[in-house]
Amino acid sequence: MNGYVLTLAALADLDAICDHFREINPSAGVRLLDAIEKQFERLVMFPLMGEHRPELGDEIRCFPVKRYVIFYRPLGTGIQVLRVLFGSRDIQRSMFDR
């Protein structure tokens, strides 16, 4: 793998972000999603850049983007994006069970 792969949960998170911003501020939503995607690409190049979060699961790391947090796992030459969650949300290990 040379890039990033989104889990179904991460895709659902991004869909929820789109739905939320579609109603309140579509242009801000587009800017946020662009920033998140650019961060995915940076994390592919520097997968250990994020904070290690072993309490959430093996090899899970996180990195903030605006008020959201990308949770991911380095894999070979890329990353697997596990979740993209609002930063003030109560994050629990069960959110990352396979």
Image: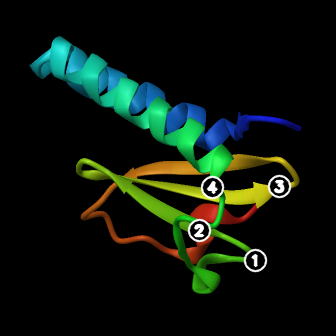
Report if the CB atoms under discs 3 and 2 are less than 8 Å apart: no
User: Which comes before the other along the chain, label 1 or label 3?
Assistant: 1
User: Which comes before the other along the chain, label 3 or label 2?
Assistant: 2
Give the Cα separation between the discs numbered 1 and 4.
18 Å
Give the Cα separation between the discs numbered 3 and 2.
12 Å
Report if the CB atoms under discs 1 and 4 are less than 8 Å apart: no
**Residue type beneath disc 4:** Phe
| Residue 40 to residue 95: above or below | above
**Residue type beneath disc 2:** Arg
User: Which comes before the other along the chain, label 1 or label 4?
Assistant: 4
Hey, which residue is sitting farthest front in the picture?
A: 45
Q: Position of residue 11 (x, y in %)?
A: 58, 32
In what element is the residue under mark 2? strand
Residue under the image location 32 percent in, 21 percent down: 19
**Residue type beneath disc 3:** Leu
Q: Residues within 10 Å of mark 4 (few under 14, many from 20)?
A: some
Q: Residues within 10 Å of mark 3 (few under 14, many from 20)?
A: some
| Residue 53 to residue 5: above or below | below
In what element is the residue under mark 3? strand
User: Which comes before the other along the chain, label 4 or label 2?
Assistant: 4
In this picture, residue 4 sits left or right of residue 40: right
Hey, which residue is sitting farthest bottom in the picture?
A: 55
State which mark lies toward you, 1 or 3. 3
Residue identified by numbered label 4: 46
State which mark lies toward you, 4 or 3. 4
State which mark lies toward you, 1 or 4. 4
Residue identified by numbered label 1: 58
Residue identified by numbered label 3: 75
**Residue type beneath disc 1:** Asp
Q: Residues within 10 Å of mark 2 (few under 14, many from 20)?
A: many
